[in-house]
């Protein structure tokens, strides 16, 4: 069971906060996990697991935490939960190790490098009875929360096409640690498409660059419910596509801005803890537009982005007060679609999702 309707911020669990260790303190851990954890109700970041002396010193200076070299040392400190933010090819081993230590575990994307590995990890968590959740924080992006509200209002009619893009201009190539652009960016875009429109039956895909080293990719997903999702990710796009364009039988919703503002805020050193209720607000210049057939175009106010809600919900799950924020089985489904997309690229044809 999952908290699959994140419209409301979950209340903090009563009693002491859940003691977390962050595994890895590279860019993802330092900017996108540590400050979010520190600002999430019911959570306390007490340790960072890293063998890099420089990163250990940074973690101590920036968050006043202990730095340890292993998951076992973190467990000895009384840590109850961990967040794994390390290179993609270490996710499965570290997640399963944490689970066997009895530590509730959050694993960053990509959750695993193939669906079979993802399924084994999910089954292990179920056997051990230990909470596990993939870090699909972008379900709490301002843009996705706004789109969910638009869809719930029903003004678009029956949705027939969903277009979603993470495109940006970046010098050089994508970092190898992400497992490839399709697995890295694709894990978020596919998860969102499945979250909104349900299971996928078939996938077609195209990419530039070799498998695991893509600089640009596109995928067309056929959902069992009839919606067609068209997803794209690019590392070298000077004029990015709209973040979302959703077409229904009665109208279209477009959100131009390519990235939720929480990312830029965290990279700039702003934090949820410091900004409180103002966190995640989007200026009117970034609001989406809704056009209905025969009607006037209008701006749609954006919801606040709420990445800390993920960790607040996970803390409640650790205390037995609710479901994990993202069902780990969703990671299996997402990885299966990404696997199918990679097969479609390699074979040059549409493939069925197993």
Image (spheres, rainbow, N blue to C red):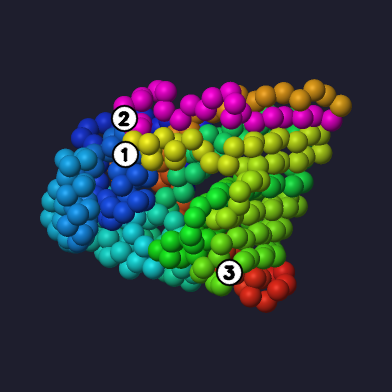
Q: CA distance from mark 3 to mark 1?
A: 34 Å
Residue extending furthest toward the right: 294
Q: In the image, is 1 to the left or to the right of 168?
A: left
**Dot 1: what SS?**
helix
Residue 206: % across, % down: 67, 65
- Dividing the picture into quadrants, the one containing residue 93 is bottom left
Horizontal side, residue 2 vs residue 29: left or right:
right
Q: Is residue 302 left or right of residue 272?
A: right
Picture coordinates of residue 353 (x, y %)?
64, 67
Answer yes or no: is residue 317 visible: no
Residue at image x 46%, y 65%? 179
Say which of 235 and 68 sits in front.
235
* Of callouts 3 and 2, the N-terminal one: 3
Residue displayed at 34% across by 59% down: 86
Let me know if residue 327 appears in the view.
yes
Residue position for label 3: 209
- The image shows residue 196 at horizontal and vertical percentages of 62, 45
Badges 3 and 1: C-beta atoms under 8 Å apart?
no
Q: Which residues are magenta?
A: 270-293
Secondary structure of the residue carrying numbered label 3:
loop
Classify mark 2: residues with Cα within 10 Å, few (<14), some (14-19) or many (20+).
some
- Residue carrying label 1: 35
Circle 2 is placed at which residue position? Answer: 273
Closer to the observer: label 3 or label 1?
Answer: 3
Choose the circle earlier in sequence order: 2 or 1.
1
């Amino acid at each position: 069971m999952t908290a699959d309707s994140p419209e409301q911020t979950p209340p903090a669990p009563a009693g002491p906060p859940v003691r977390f260790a962050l595994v890895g303190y590279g860019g993802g851990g330092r900017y996108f996990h540590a400050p979010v954890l520190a600002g999430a109700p019911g959570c306390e970041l007490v340790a960072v697991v890293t063998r890099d002396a420089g990163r250990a010193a940074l973690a101590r200076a920036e968050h006043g935490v202990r730095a340890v070299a292993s998951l076992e040392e973190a467990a000895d400190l009384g840590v109850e939960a961990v967040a794994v933010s390390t290179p993609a090819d270490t996710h499965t081993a570290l997640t399963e190790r944490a689970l066997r230590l009895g530590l509730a575990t959050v694993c960053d994307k990509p959750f695993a490098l193939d669906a079979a590995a993802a399924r084994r990890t999910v089954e292990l968590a179920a056997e051990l009875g230990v909470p596990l959740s993939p870090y699909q924080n972008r379900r709490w992006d301002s843009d996705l929360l706004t789109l969910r509200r638009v869809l719930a209002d029903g003004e678009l009619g029956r949705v027939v096409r969903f277009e979603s893009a993470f495109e940006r201009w970046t010098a050089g190539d994508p970092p190898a640690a992400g497992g490839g652009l399709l697995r890295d960016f694709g894990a978020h875009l596919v998860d969102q498409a499945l979250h909104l429109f349900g299971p996928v039956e078939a996938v077609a895909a195209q990419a530039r660059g070799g498998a695991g080293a893509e600089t640009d990719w596109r995928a067309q997903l056929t959902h069992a419910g009839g919606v067609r999702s068209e997803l794209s990710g690019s590392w070298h796009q000077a004029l990015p596509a709209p973040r979302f364009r959703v077409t229904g039988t009665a109208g279209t919703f477009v959100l131009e801005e390519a990235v939720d503002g929480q990312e830029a805020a965290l990279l700039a050193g702003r934090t949820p803890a410091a900004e409180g209720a103002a966190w995640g607000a989007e200026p009117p210049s970034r609001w989406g537009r809704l056009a209905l057939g025969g009607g006037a175009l209008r701006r749609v106010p954006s919801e606040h982005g709420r990445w800390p809600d993920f960790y607040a919900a996970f803390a409640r799950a650790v205390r037995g007060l609710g479901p994990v924020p993202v069902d780990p089985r969703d990671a299996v489904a997402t990885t299966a679609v990404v696997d199918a997309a990679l097969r479609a690229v390699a074979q040059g044809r549409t493939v069925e999702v197993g």
